[in-house]
Amino acid sequence: MSTIQSPQTVAAQLKALGTDGVHLDLPQLLQYQHHTYLLDLAPKQVIQSKLAGSYLARSKGRGMEFDEVRHYQPGDDVRTIDWRVTARTGKVHTKLFREEKERPVFVLTDLSPGMHFGSVLLTKAVQAAHLAALVGWHAKNRGDKFGGILLNGTQIRELKPASRSVAVLRYLQQLLELAVPATAPAESSLSLADAVGQLRRLVRPGSLIYIISDFFALDANVLRHLQSMRQHNEIRLCQILDPLEQQLPLQVQGQISVQSPQTVLQLDLTPQAIKQQYQQQQQQLLQQQQTFWRSLGLRHVQLSTALSLRQQLSSTDTLSGVMAQGAAHG
């Protein structure tokens, strides 16, 4: 996917998104309630929640949704005997029902200092916030409870799942507070592992979990927490990447300035060998991460900061997990 865009094209896209690409405001995030069609939050695995809800579980139980009739077995509730089938066959049959389960939706949004970087359209933090808003509004439309974790490197905010618009608006407010770019470099005392560990303590079995990050802080502790949560929940990993984190622009000669809210980095791109070495290192890092995701059976998709979510999700198989093993590269 090409990321070379004219200044006029970038300006037009920023205007359509209602952002300067660096800062967040509420109107930016509210607009995603009109684009929930881009996502599919339907369950992709067995729901294991013990709480009653609106999703049909694969396990049989005493729910409200009729499933099938089978021979009566010792221990079956006599109130579920199907007398018509019993009279017709001469053998006692009982009705089985499919249980209805609740499935809260949790989103972990990484807003650490490293996420405040972008070279084309948006910073990674802004793109992550847009995606979190999209997931939140879709969860609200489906009637799911919504909550999660927010990390900005120095703080971790926890929001217990709640229903209706108030839950989404509460999360959006926290995004606005924590996604403010720092005017000076700050020491990060809290890591992605800390946030994922807190998320692990917050979630309940049968939940849908979105983790939105660049995953550059991936370590053994993050993997350990993911492996534990994966046993009883559905996890979808959304990796936000900038084009310059994957490949240096080959057409540029001399020096290029890469700006972020914290610093301006000067890169000498003249030697071709440096460009090739950089690209190889980044590809190896991403391939190693994808190996981890596959080994844990986790759904994974990559999204670029160079294009809007609408442009990317409308041209892919969405974040439903179909692209789990074949990520879309920006």
Image (cartoon, rainbow, N blue to C red):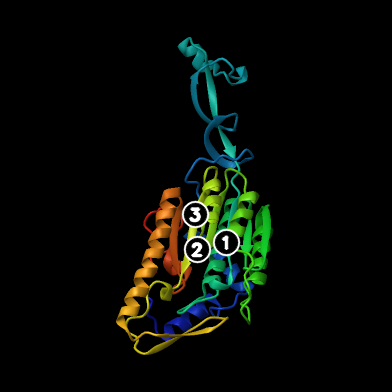
**Disc number for residue 177:** none
Residue 28 x/y as whole percent: 58, 72
Q: What residue does disc 2 label?
A: 215
Kind of residue sitting beneath label 3: Arg
Q: How many labels does the image show?
A: 3
**Residue ranking furthest to the left:** 272
CA gap, disc 2 and disc 1: 8 Å
Kind of residue sitting beneath label 2: Phe
Kind of residue sitting beneath label 1: Leu
Question: In front here: 156 or 130?
Answer: 156
Q: Are marks 3 and 2 in contact (CB under 8 Å)?
A: no
Query: Looking at the image, is mark 2 or mark 1 earlier in the sequence?
Result: 1
**Considering the numbered disc 1 on the image, is that residue within a helix, a strand or a loop?**
helix
Q: What residue does disc 3 label?
A: 236
CA gap, disc 3 and disc 2: 13 Å
Q: Nearer the viewer, mark 3 or mark 2?
A: 2
Using the rendered image of the protein, determine whether residue 66 is visible from the camera's viewpoint.
yes
Whether residue 158 sits left or right of residue 280 in the image: it is right
**Disc number for residue 192:** 1
**Which residue is at a point 49% across and 57% down the rendered structure image?**
237
Residue 260 x/y as whole percent: 53, 81
Question: In front here: 235 or 100?
Answer: 235
Q: Do the residues labelled 2 and 1 touch (CB within 8 Å)?
A: yes
Q: Which of marks 1 and 3 is in front?
A: 1
**Considering the numbered disc 2 on the image, is that residue within a helix, a strand or a loop?**
loop
